[in-house]
Image (tube, helix red, strand yellow):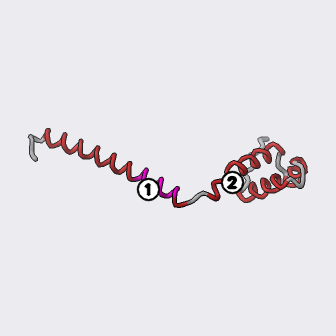
Amino acid sequence: MTMRKRQHTPQFKAKVALEAIQGESTLNEIGARHGVSPMQICHWKKAAIEHLAELFQDGRRKHRGSVDADKDELYRQIGQLKVELDWLKKRAGGVK
C-alpha cells in the first residue's frame, strides 16, 4: 500500500509557521499538535521569515517594473515585424 503525500493549504502553513515564529512551543510540540514533521515546520518558518519583507514592498514599484518589461517586449516585437516586413518587400520586387 502506497502512502499518499499530504498537501496542506497555504493558510495552514502560515498558521503553523506563525506558531513556530512566536516560539511559545517547541517544533516537536507544534508538529505533534498539527500532525506535521518538525523539519517541515522549520522549512515553513524559514520561508515565512524570508518572504515577510515582500508584504511591505511598494506595490506601485512592482507594477512599474512589469509595465517596463511589457513595453520592452512590445518594442522587440515591433522591431522584429519591421525586419520581416522589409524582407518581404524586397522579396516582392522592391514595392515600397
Residue hosting label 1: 67
Give, as a three-letter code, the residue at label 2: Leu
Residue 17 x/y as whole percent: 78, 53
Q: Residue at x 82, y 49 (%)?
A: 36
How many residues crowd mark 2 within 10 Å: few (<14), some (14–19), many (20+)? few
Q: Residue at x 89, y 49 (%)?
A: 26
- Left of 46 or right of it: where is 95? left
Q: Which residue is drawn at 77% across and 41% down?
A: 2
Check if residue 22 falls in the magenta segment: no
Q: How far apart are marks 2 and 1 (CA)?
A: 24 Å
Residue 27 x/y as whole percent: 86, 48
The quadrant the N terminus occupies is top right
Give, as a three-letter code, the residue at label 1: Val
Check if residue 68 falls in the magenta segment: yes
Q: What element carries label 1?
A: helix
Residue 62 x/y as whole percent: 52, 56
Where are the magenta residues, as a range?
Answer: 61-70
Between residue 92 and residue 4, name the one nearer to us: 92
Asked which quadrant contains residue 58, the reply is bottom right
- Left of 92 or right of it: where is 49? right
Q: Residue at x 69, y 48 (%)?
A: 50
Residue hosting label 2: 52
